[in-house]
Amino acid sequence: MIAIVDHGYANIRSVDRMLRRMGHLPIIADRPSDLRNVDRIVLPGVGAFNGPMHRLKELGLIDALHEHAIIRQRPILGICVGMQIMTNRSEEGAAEGLGWVDGECRKFTPDSEHRLRVPHMGWNKVDAQPRAELFRERESKFYFVHSYYVSLADQSLIAAKCTHGVDFCASFQKENIFGVQFHPEKSHRYGMALLKAFMDI
């Protein structure tokens, strides 16, 4: 059983549609009790770092997420800002992250000389590390929309990299905790393959 967390700062319908196309029936979770018996959780997110963190607190979901990811050590996948809030903090705001992965979110710096635009938007190539469990192909293309990227204290947790002016972490993996900066639900066959790999863990 899989749950998609609905904190109000994500397009959960796109994730829900793709999982249903794959034959799954996700629960849309906005209460702690919704997460009690699930095997996997998808934590999507869009917008600014502070919004999802404040809303998760208001909904009482942080302890339930911690129970699932840290105590029960069940698979959880953070998407875009959902990945970012798994870290400690962001340059974008003052809210503390979940702190499951030691790192922080930093803003891309616009560069007119190299035509580096912020936000980083559109399709880009992702290079997966050999041990990365979510990636069936070494090179894939995924759809990105973000102005901030995750900088990890432990580089060995990087599962895949991408380049937008700088090389950045496109995905991390820490045991049962997975994060992707791109949107698999908007990435067609590459995104479906990644979600399938997550469901197969």
Image: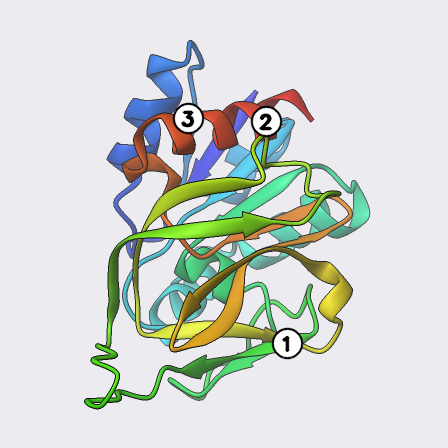
Q: At 79% from the left edge and 40% from the top edge, which residue is drawn? A: 72
Q: Which residue is nearer to you in this view: 125 or 49?
A: 125
Please state which amino acid type lies under the numbered disc 2.
Ala
Real-space CA distance between mark 1 and mark 2, rounded to the nearest whole angstrom? 25 Å
Mark 2, secondary structure of its residue:
helix
Indicate the quadrant where residue 122 lies. Answer: bottom left
Q: Mark 1 or mark 2: which is in front?
A: 2
Q: Name the residue that disc number 2 marks.
A: 197
87 displayed left or right of 42: right
Q: Which residue is drawn at 39% across and 39% down?
A: 184
Mark seen at residue 192: 3
Classify 10 Å Cα crowding around label 2: few (below 14), some (14-19), many (20 and above). some
Q: Residue 103 carries which label?
A: 1
Q: Position of residue 59 (x, y in %)?
A: 43, 56
Tell which circle, 1 or 2, labels the residue nearer the N-terminal end: 1
Coordinates of residue 191 in the picture (x, y in percent): 40, 33
Are there few (<14), some (14-19), or many (20+) residues within 10 Å of tag 3?
Answer: some
**In the rendered image, which quarter is residue 103 located in?**
bottom right
| Residue type at numbered disc 3 | Met
The reply to whether residue 168 is in sight is yes
Q: In which quadrant is the C terminus drawn?
A: top right
Residue at the far front in the pictured view: 113
Q: In this view, does 58 lie above or below 26?
A: below
The answer to whether residue 25 is above or below residue 195 is above
- Label 3: state its secondary structure: helix
Q: What residue type is labelled 1?
A: Gly
Query: Along the horizontal axis of the image, is 76 left or right of 131?
Result: left
- CA separation, marks 3 and 2? 9 Å
Can residue 30 be seen in the rendering of this structure? no
Q: Residue at x 26, y 87 (%)?
A: 110
Location of residue 147 in the rendering, given as x and y in whole percent from the top left corner: 31, 74
| Front of the two marks 1 and 3 | 3
